[in-house]
Image (cartoon, helix red, strand yellow):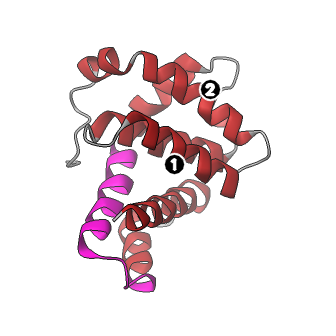
Amino acid sequence: MKRERRRARSLALQVLYEVDCVGHPVAEVIARNLSDNSSLGDEAARFFQNLVLGTLGAKSILDDLIADCAPEWPIDELAIVDRSVLRLALWELLAFEQTPLKVVINEAVELAKRYGSSSAPRFVNGVLGTIALQKQEIRRRTPQITEEPS
């Protein structure tokens, strides 16, 4: 299942990037990705959909958290990939309590290495590390972020 969840995160990042970059309809992009990746198991497919829909549903909250932790980097000036990796990881960190903190951060750093610039992994690690220190307080302030997006 570990490999499946990693693949789901990668697909979710690709969807978030496409939606942010060119504005394609989310439902269509999700459906196309699920069709193109039909070998993805049912549980991983649900995880993928939850990641995408949850991240997009909480985008403004996540952007505020990123802005608080990296005020010298305005959210709209971040590279789309970096912004998408951070949003995705933050949503998983806050919504999926069963996913260990280290796993969320490591997976985000791996996505940043694979898809981002050479400085992206360090930046992603720094922002997530800062947020990790405040995780319980942030969860308390953001009860609307749940594993099942509305």
Across and down, in percent, residue 141 comes to 27, 17
Q: Amino acid at mark 2?
A: Gly
- Disc 2 from disc 1: Cα separation: 14 Å
119 or 33: nearer the eye?
Answer: 119
- Residue 122's image quarter? top right
Q: Please give the name of the residue rendered at 62% of the width and 21% of the height, measured from the top-left corner.
A: 70
Q: Are marks 2 and 1 in contact (CB under 8 Å)?
A: no
Q: How dense is the environment of label 2, judged by Cα within 10 Å: few (below 14), some, or many (20 and up)?
A: some
Across and down, in percent, residue 98 comes to 25, 41
Q: Is residue 19 left or right of residue 49?
A: right
Instruction: Give the main secondary structure, helix, strand or loop, of the magenta stretch.
Output: helix
Q: Please give the name of the residue rendered at 39% of the width and 48% of the height, measured from the top-left corner.
A: 56
- Is-magenta flag for residue 91? no
On residue 36, which mark appears? none
The residue tagged with tag 2: helix, strand or loop? Answer: helix
On residue 126, which mark appears? 2
Residue topped by disc 1: 107
Across and down, in percent, residue 86 comes to 53, 39
Q: Which residues are the magenta region?
A: 35-57
